């Protein structure tokens, strides 16, 4: 098969790494890719939102399968563009990707189908939101309805903060039209877990659990980021919790989408909060998580291309999804200053240490090939260093050891990825 992956982050590098292990793949392309992906695939300089060029390229190369990685193209209809051209694509259509693309849609869906989530109200007018907040219980969570690079969620401790938040989202339009509508949500307390799942429209197969670290600094301080590190499995995601989620959340979501005539094929990422009253859905994403994918796929036993095809063909029930009985930790190496201002263009040294080191992986995110062929930094999150271990503690020690193998100017990481493991 000739396969094309759309995207160029750490998630896409992990998907590409897993895809080339499939005996079914004889040629892999990636648009636009990055310096790490370029070692295993042919990268083409086409942006993730350039659907016409993507389709034209796929047609000219006779691509058999397209995999769309990021949320922005999926929500904007990337899968639809390939389907319209008669191609096989892994990823939800636009009408299903709104599960991530619109918070009010997903909240209304959960309410209608009794899927556990935080109580909420939706507002299209700032004045109504401000009036509502006067009597709301603090802290409260404000969410821009649309995609906002993961930054459209504001946790407000006081009424003043909440009012400022409404102004930022709805009047100052910090996230553009994503803030035309907001969801005001009850604040939930608990541990967060990320659960990714393959979905074929009717069947769902759950992958092993993971936990992300969203804040920039140690001790969960600093600004929200795309994710500074992950571990898998989550020791807090017990069999009892899994059973509850299977009964009330996972299949229920797939069925709800089908009932709404928005059949979902692709990845559903369940962002869960384990509250005292039980697990509740924080959010849905319509794609693999980043950097969750970098700890989940190295533990997956199956041929991922077979699973992708089963999702497209509606035969996921025939797949026996299996994961290794081990653990993985990923530490993100970022450019100092991320997620705000940072410099890029620095050579990345030491990547060769990962060659032939079983159980150690370096997934590139913000990198590109420099003039002399050596990769240089090209983004906020530069690399994800993943290591396996027999258990989480071993995986964590291995991952931090491997972070020393690579270096670049302004290298920054959190030193407490997986600290929660010690509380399990
Ligand atoms: P989201 O993009 O919806 O996942 O929100 C980003 C982050 O905000 C989540 O990972 C949580 O840490 C936090 N968050 C979102 N909604 C809530 C909530 N209702 N209660 C507490 N924290 C929340
Ligand atoms: N790591 C969180 C996300 O992918 O949205």
Image (cartoon, rainbow, N blue to C red):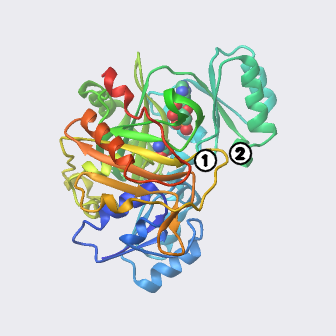
Against 163, is 386 above or below?
below
Element on which disc 1 rests: loop
- Write the residue at 39% across / 78% down: 63
The residue wearing badge 2 is: 175
User: Residue 25 occupies which quadrant of the picture?
Assistant: bottom left
Q: Which image quarter holds the C terminus?
A: top left
Do we see residue 285 in this rendering? no
Where is residue 296 shown, x and y percent of the image? Answer: 32, 47
Q: Residue at x 37, y 32 (%)?
A: 418
Q: Work out whether mark 1 precedes mark 2 in sequence or the reverse, and give the earlier one.
A: 1
Q: Residue furthest bottom?
A: 60
Q: Measuring 77% from the left and 27% from the top, which residue is drawn there?
A: 164
Q: Are marks 1 and 2 in contact (CB under 8 Å)?
A: yes
Question: Does residue 70 sit above or below 212 in this rendering?
Answer: below
Quadrant holding the N terminus: bottom left
Answer yes or no: is residue 240 visible: yes
- Which residue occupies 33% across, 43% down? 401
- Spatial CA distance of label 1 from label 2 is 9 Å
Given residues 228 and 170, the one toward you in this image is 228
SS label for mark 2: loop
CB of mark 1 near ligand 2 (< 8 Å): no
Mark 1 — residue?
Answer: 149
Give ligand 1's quarter of the image. top right
Disc 1 packing (10 Å; few <14; some 14–19; many ≥20): few
Using residue 77 as the reference point, say whether residue 175 is left or right of it.
right
């Amino acid at each position: 098969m000739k396969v094309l992956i759309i995207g160029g982050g750490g998630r896409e590098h992990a998907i590409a790494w897993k895809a080339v292990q499939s005996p079914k793949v004889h040629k892999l392309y990636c648009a636009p890719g990055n310096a790490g992906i370029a070692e295993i695939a042919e990268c083409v300089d086409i942006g993730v939102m350039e659907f016409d060029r993507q389709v034209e390229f796929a047609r000219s190369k006779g691509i058999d399968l397209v995999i769309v990685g990021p949320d922005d193209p999926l929500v904007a209809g990337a899968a639809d563009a390939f389907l319209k051209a008669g191609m096989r694509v892994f990823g939800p259509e636009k009408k299903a990707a709104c599960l991530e693309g619109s918070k009010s849609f997903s909240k209304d869906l959960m309410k209608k189908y009794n899927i556990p989530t935080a109580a909420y109200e939706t507002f299209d007018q700032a004045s109504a939101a401000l009036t509502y907040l006067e009597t709301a219980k603090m802290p409260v969570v404000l969410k821009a309805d649309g995609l906002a690079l993961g930054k459209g969620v504001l946790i407000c401790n006081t009424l003043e903060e909440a009012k400022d938040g409404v102004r930022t989202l709805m009047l100052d339009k910090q996230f553009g039209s994503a803030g035309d509508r907001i969801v005001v949500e009850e604040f939930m307390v608990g541990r967060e877990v990320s659960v990714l799942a393959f979905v074929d429209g009717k069947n769902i197969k759950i992958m092993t659990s993971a936990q992300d670290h969203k804040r920039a600094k140690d001790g969960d301080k600093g600004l929200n980021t795309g994710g500074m590190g992950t571990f898998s499995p989550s020791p807090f995601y017990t069999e009892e919790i899994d059973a509850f989620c299977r009964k009330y959340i996972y299949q229920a979501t797939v069925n709800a989408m089908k009932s709404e005539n928005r059949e979902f094929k692709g990845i559903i990422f369940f962002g869960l909060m384990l509250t005292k009253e039980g697990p509740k859905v924080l959010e849905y994403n319509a794609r693999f998580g980043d950097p969750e994918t970098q700890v989940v796929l190295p533990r997956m036993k199956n041929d991922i291309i077979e699973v992708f095809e089963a999702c497209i063909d509606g035969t996921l029930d025939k797949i026996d999804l299996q994961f290794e009985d081990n653990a993985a930790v990923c530490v993100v190496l970022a450019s100092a200053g991320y997620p705000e201002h940072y410099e890029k263009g620095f050579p990345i040294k030491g990547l060769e240490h990962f060659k032939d080191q079983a159980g150690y992986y370096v997934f590139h995110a913000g990198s590109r090939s420099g003039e002399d062929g050596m990769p240089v930094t090209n983004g906020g999150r530069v690399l994800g260093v993943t290591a396996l271990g027999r258990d989480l503690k071993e995986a964590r020690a291995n991952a931090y050891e491997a972070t020393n193998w690579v270096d670049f100017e302004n290298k920054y990481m959190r030193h407490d990825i997986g600290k929660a493991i010690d509380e399990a």
